[in-house]
Amino acid sequence: MLRLIQTMMMGGNNTSQQNTEIPIRKATIEITKNTVKFGSDVYQFRNVTGFGVCPVRTFKVPLLLIGLFFIVGLFLFIFYNDDHGQKSAGFAMIFIAFLAFIYNMFWPLTYGLKLYLNSGSPLPIFITSDMRGLKKVVAVLYDFMESNEEGRYVVYSNDNSIKIEGGIGGSFTGGNIGGDSSSYVGGNVSRND
């Protein structure tokens, strides 16, 4: 009976990691037709269902808190004399409210390169504020997923930039070849008779 109750309680508290996100601030992602590797994690490329751009939550100071600091600071600054430092405290609160407002207005938005997996979780998000570079990376990875060509790409991601290097290449053999053959797209094709 006790085991049944424990099983029921565990089932009720089962919090699977379905659709959880793992923010990654600095990463090098290696992508081939067979694998996707970043850090110590390696996924089969066929388990990747897509790459996408998503906004990433950034901390913002609540406007209610900013307004509260401003009003209390203004009240202290105007209505009290400076015998016990109330005017100084009021000025400090007004200044803090001003800094928090400036922070909210001018802090750069951050976005992420989201890696969608068949399993659904965890979903790694490579964070950056470089939206132009992020769109370019997604476009290149889309073309790579659509092609049947072999290739290798490396994506370098950090807080303020993201870039991609690499390209499509691979072996190609066509026609009737006798003897030894070696070829590489973009290289020399040789045939020994």
Image: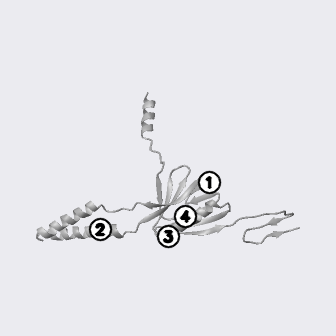
- 88 with respect to 182 (left or right): left
Q: Earlier in the sequence, mark 3 or mark 1?
A: 1
Q: Is 83 located above or below residue 1 in the figure?
A: below
Q: Secondary structure at mark 2?
A: helix
Crowding near pointer 1: few (<14 within 10 Å), some, many (20+)? some
- 81 with respect to 7 (left or right): left
The answer to the question of whether label 3 and label 2 lie on touching residues, with beta carbons closer than 8 A, is: no
User: In the rendered view of the protein, which quadrant contains the N terminus?
Assistant: top left
Q: Secondary structure at mark 4?
A: helix
Inter-mark Cα distance, 4 to 2: 33 Å
Q: What's under tag 1, amino acid-wise? A: Arg
Please identify the quarter of the rendering in which residue 77 is found: bottom left
Inter-mark Cα distance, 3 to 2: 27 Å
User: In the rendered view of the protein, which quadrant contains the C terminus?
Assistant: bottom right
Crowding near pointer 4: few (<14 within 10 Å), some, many (20+)? some
Inter-mark Cα distance, 1 to 2: 46 Å
